[in-house]
Image (cartoon, rainbow, N blue to C red):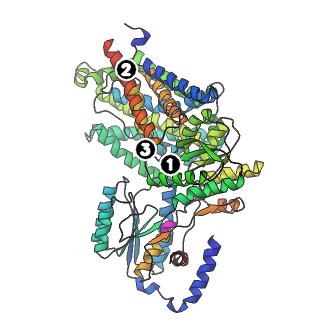
Amino acid sequence: MKTIAKLFTVTAALAMTTALPVAADTSGKSIALSNNYAGNSWRQAMLESWSKVTGAAVADGVVKAADAFTTSENQATEQAAQIQNMILQGYDAIVLNAASPTAINGAVKEACDAGITVVSFDGIVTEPCAWRIAVDFKQMGRNQVKYLAERYPDGGNLLEIRGLAGVFVDDEISAGIHEEVANTNFEIVGSVHGDWAQDVAQKAVAGILPSLPELTAVVTQGGDGYGAAQAIAAANRPTPTIVMGNRQDELAWWAEQKAANGYETTSLSIAPGVSTLAFWVAQQILDGADVPKDLTVPFLTIEQDGLEAALETTPVGSVANVEYSLEDAKAVIDASQ
Amino acid sequence: MSGLSQKPWIWSYLAALAAFGATMIVSGGQGGGSLFFAALTFASFAVIVGVGQMFVITLGPGNVDLSIPATMTLAATLALKFMDTNTSLMLPGLLIALGTGTACGIFNFGLILLLRIPPIIATLSSSFLFQSLAIWSNRGLRIKPPEPLADFATGGLVIPNLALVAIGVAVVAWIVLERAIVGRWILATGQNMRAAQLSGVPVNGVRFGVYVASAILASLSGFLLANFSGGANLNMGAEYMLTSIAVVVIGGSSIAGGNSNVPGVCGAALFMFLLVSMLNSYGFGAGARLILTGVIIMMVVVFASKRKYAA
């Protein structure tokens, strides 16, 4: 996926060599990151990618400043106040991972009215004046089942591990899984909430396992595959095909099983570096580029063959990541036009 | 009047048994052993933090330790980072976890006594500090525990090793509460702090000991949980905020303080795990599951408190 994007951008860059010196136009602009939550490894990696990429961009004079701010309580009201402060501080653009798709629309509108470019990503906002770099969560669910249907055309029993009850992302991924399962011979025999955390998933799976028949596969939402594997091993059951979510401990476990008995599965999630994609998109908008309001984040999928390479570049205890460049951002923009 | 049916804690065990039976009905009697083993394992974490919370709640209205999740996370994060999968550092790692817990407890009580901040506010605000320290110290990276510790935490012969630790904690807590002078002091402080003080109970010493003990037990539970689940998570303690309070109340201890029991905490911890397992096994959706969890917990609490006043 990455190489295709690269090829694409090389041609794109060749085609518009005359328009290349764009950096000068945004060198006086400052961009702020408004982030609602930092309490897990994915968000920590997201913030780290942000500071790495934007730090270099500031040093190169592409933008004047790119400061990151995180609210402590993951509350929409708190984030709305944070955005209002950013308006007063005079930022030119706000890159936003929102606590709620609707609850901070008021503050976002105020920012737009003040002439500020607002780019939301991952946790997007519905306010029409803002840009959205959205994840197709339904497709994420569908892709898992599609992979499994290819491996097991005859179907079998599925255990579904969901995320945090009541959250939009959880409903979307689960809906995608259920829609696709309807087209296959699979049956979902159990469903638990793992809250996207290994220890919670481990506990929930250990509790439901005794009442389940033999499992063919486990569909997940990310951050729960390793916990499921632990719970199934503790119950002395045969290991089903567990779809992973790009966490390093999941990949390490997979590599261990692959070496021991040729275990096969797939792993997909969104790279935390999507924050850097949002940064470049905001930079492009400030630069006067014509950017559609709705963009889609590419998935980061790790296949059986790419496992070792992905594991090597993922820091221990973190999550597989890709940082996006200006060229990647242009490719994503072009792809949606 | 001291028959078994008059004990407030008996209801949590009956409820746990009923939930176990109901799960076995849906599974057709399959997997009873592994469900029992899993229940003992996961109840252990709740028992260890629950005992600490029980002592705090015993101190009377307004006393509750909301920093338990953050203390668990901080202790586990620092200990696992220090050990860094190194087998020779296991004991120092445990000491670092317990030392972190001690420091957290002293800090909490410092806020309560010296700055006169109400315990709920004090422990809530200190938990932000502990959580931030945990984030700052390791940026959310999950470091694996040393192999022998992971084996210990996930292993066991007839009953899980963790359950042995939890039973040990519970027995010591029972002796302290029911058979030691300190236990009388804690109960007296909870029933009427002024009266206790006038009758010569070192009230501030008692409160200090209880808050520090609660934080140490939280750090022990966090350390074990991280070893059990393959590393410390920044949000690993989150669910123990409510669980630690729920097991105390369901176990038949008075939420107003001054009247607590240890066996109830253990029964309630088993019940909390088995209840969720039962509802999952019956295939209830998240909404129905949460409603049923609330209704069933309320029923158990009503039964437990009715019996207490009848006695």
- How far apart in space, not on screen, are marks 3 and 2 (Cα)? 33 Å
- Residue A219 at x, y percent in the picture: 60, 49
Task: Give me the disc on residue B270.
Answer: none
Q: Chain of mark 2?
A: B
Residue extending farthest to the top is B1
Q: Tell me the crowding category of disc 2: few under 14, some 14 to 19, or many 20 or more residues within 10 angstroms, Cα based.
A: some
Q: Are marks 3 and 2 on the same chain?
A: yes
Residues drawn in magenta:
A269-276
Rendered image: mark on residue A163:
1
On the image, which quarter does residue B310 sit in? top left
User: Is label 3 or label 2 in front?
Assistant: 2
Which residue lies under the disc numbered 2? B303
Tell me: B170 left or right of B7.
right
Specify the amino acid type for callout 2: Phe
Q: Measure the C-alpha gap from mark 3 to mark 1.
A: 22 Å
Q: Earlier in the sequence, mark 3 or mark 2?
A: 3
Q: Residue at x 54, y 61 (%)?
A: A270
Q: Is residue B186 above or below residue A231?
A: above
Dot 2 falls on a residue whose secondary structure is helix
Q: Quick check: can you spot residue B17?
A: yes
From the image, which quarter does the N terminus of chain B lie in? top left
The amino acid marked with disc number 3 is: Ala
Read off the chain for label 1. Answer: A
